Amino acid sequence: MKWITHIGFSVLIFLIINNILEITPKHIAIISMIFCVFGGLLPDIDIHFKFFSKHRGLMHSIIGLLMLSIFIPILLILLGFQIVAFCFLAGYFFHLFLDSFTRTGIKWFPFTRQSRGKLKTGSLREGLLAVVIWTIVVLFTLIKGF
Ligand SMILES: [Zn+2]
């Protein structure tokens, strides 16, 4: 999936979390959203840094989430920002979730089968999905507020 789709979906996930948990104060909610988007983009770092993982390899698995990225939520929890850590993990998890619907797919765990769908990254279908996601984000924000 393209970054614009992942950002939109991460913001949507954050809005849902914020709607349920009503994160306060406001600046923590904003930081939580930023970290949700950060988590939602981080797995694709393997496009640029191929030295520890091929694209859609280790970084695109639960093992990658636990091994390579867990220091970020642990640091956040130690600093007292549990909700921010939760939003980061949610962003990361839902990146994997979205990518599991692509033709290339992902492996949730190294020993499991490739989890894949019919969506081609960068295709018109993905573009439409991004438009739908961003439309929901805008409507959600207009109706429910931030
Ligand atoms: Zn990805």
Image: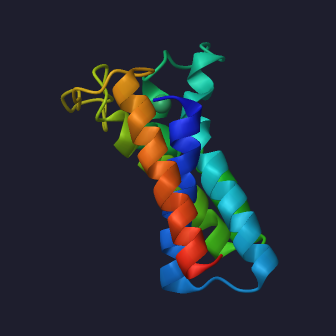
Q: Left or right of 54: which side holds 62?
A: left
Q: How is the image coloured?
A: rainbow
Residue 144: % across, % down: 55, 80
Regarding residue 71, the answer to whether it shows in the image is no
Q: Left or right of 3: which side holds 28?
A: right
Q: Quadrant of residue 11?
A: bottom right
Q: Quadrant of residue 111?
A: top left
Q: Is 75 or 104 nearer to us in this picture?
A: 104
Q: Which residue is pictured at 59% across the width and 73% down the height?
A: 142
- Residue 11 vs 17, above or below: the answer is above
Task: Check the picture and name the quadrant holding the C terminus.
Answer: bottom right
Task: Check the picture and name the quadrant holding the N terminus.
Answer: top left
Regarding residue 145, the answer to whether it shows in the image is yes
- Residue 5 vs 119, above or below: the answer is below
Q: Which residue is pictured at 31% across the width and 38% down the height?
A: 108
Residue 58: % across, % down: 45, 28
Q: Which residue is pictured at 52% across the width and 50% down the height?
A: 134
Q: Which residue is pictured at 30% across the width and 30% down the height?
A: 110
Q: Left or right of 88: which side holds 100?
A: left
Residue 135: % across, % down: 49, 54
> How many labels were placed on the picture?
0
Residue 139: % across, % down: 52, 66
